Image (spheres, rainbow, N blue to C red):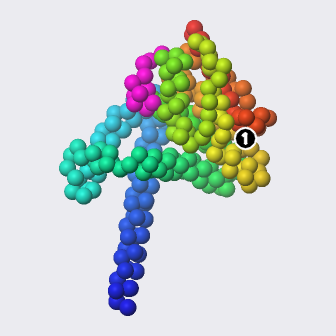
């Protein structure tokens, strides 16, 4: 009996610790996001993204160092070595878990605002968030991939392939020329889930225009974004939304 109780207590203790870690991540993300949001409000998007670059680079190094020292007594520089010891499948699963958690955070916030203030308010908050996040995501892609400023269509293709959505949804490039390309989302997790539930497409066009326009402009200000179709627009079975990017002279 005592052995069973000890095991039950250990399981309960482990579950509590896992919940604590989840809570820490939650508050870390919220605090970081509030700093970014208020920086945009006080300084403007451009200056806020410059500040995020500095703060984010420093924070990444700090967090990596702390994790190295916390996990199995690892010393500085050993965290990457520890992670590299995991097989590719496990690392891919870890990446997918984090990416899908990002998407879930977007969804639960939308639903919470919709429940409090209605669809219109939720869409306004959503579109404002994308107006800020899409340029940040583009800057991170440029930095991580070493993309040049004014990199044109090729830089845009590389950056779109590095987005959070890139591993969550299925997509394709079509109609590519030296100065233009069409990006099509052939399977969207959000819309596919709604379809399974017998629901109409979520009308995401306003957010999509904000998102893709801001992302492309950050990659290269000469890129012009045109929506070919996005819900509530009708669309064929082959794709959910489609966007044409054209490199202009201005």
Placement of 224 over or under 164, stated as above or below: above
Residue position marked by numbered label 1 in the rendering: 203
Residue 98 visible in the picture: no
Q: Is residue 163 magenta?
A: no
Write the residue at 45% across / 30% down: 141
Q: Residues within 10 Å of mark 1 (few under 14, many from 20)?
A: some
The extreme top residue here reads 249
Placement of 250 over or under 48, stated as above or below: above
Where the C terminus falls, by quadrant?
top right
Is residue 185 or residue 215 the one in the foreground? 185
Placement of 203 over or under 180, stated as above or below: below
Task: Please provide percent x and percent y for residue 118.
Answer: 70, 50
Write the residue at 72% across / 26% down: 228
Is residue 218 or residue 64 the one in the foreground? 64
Task: Please provide percent x and percent y for residue 26.
Answer: 45, 55
Placement of 20 over or under 130, stated as above or below: below
Task: Please provide percent x and percent y for residue 11.
Answer: 40, 75
Residue 87 visible in the picture: yes
- Seen in the image, is 187 located left or right of residue 33? right
Write the residue at 50% across / 26% down: 158
Range of the magenta residues? 140-150
Where the N terminus falls, by quadrant?
bottom left
Is residue 250 or residue 163 the one in the foreground? 163
Q: Is residue 146 magenta?
A: yes
Write the residue at 51% across / 51% down: 101
- Seen in the image, is 237 located left or right of residue 142? right
- SS class, disc 1: loop
Task: Please provide percent x and percent y for residue 31.
Answer: 42, 49
């Amino acid at each position: 009996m005592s052995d069973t109780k000890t095991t039950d207590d250990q399981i309960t203790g482990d579950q509590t610790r896992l919940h604590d870690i989840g809570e820490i991540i939650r508050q870390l993300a919220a605090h970081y996001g509030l700093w970014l949001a208020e920086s945009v409000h006080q300084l403007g998007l451009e200056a806020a993204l410059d500040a995020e670059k500095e703060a984010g680079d420093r924070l990444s190094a700090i967090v990596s160092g702390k994790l190295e020292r916390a996990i199995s007594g690892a010393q500085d520089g050993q965290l990457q070595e520890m992670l590299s010891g995991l097989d590719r499948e496990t690392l891919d699963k870890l990446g997918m878990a984090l990416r899908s958690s990002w998407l879930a955070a977007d969804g639960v916030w939308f639903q919470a605002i919709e429940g409090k203030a209605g669809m219109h308010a939720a869409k306004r908050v959503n579109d404002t968030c994308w107006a800020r996040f899409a340029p940040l995501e583009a800057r991170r892609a440029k930095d991580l991939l070493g993309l040049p400023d004014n990199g044109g269509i090729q830089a845009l293709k590389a950056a779109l392939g590095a987005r959070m959505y890139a591993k969550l949804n299925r997509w394709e490039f079509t109609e590519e020329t030296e100065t233009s390309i069409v990006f099509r989302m052939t399977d969207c997790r959000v819309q596919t889930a709604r379809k399974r539930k017998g629901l109409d497409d979520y009308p995401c066009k306003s957010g999509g225009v904000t998102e893709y326009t801001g992302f492309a402009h950050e990659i290269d200000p000469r890129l012009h974004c045109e929506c070919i179709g996005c819900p509530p627009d009708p669309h064929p079975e082959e794709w959910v939304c489609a966007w044409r990017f054209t490199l202009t002279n201005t």
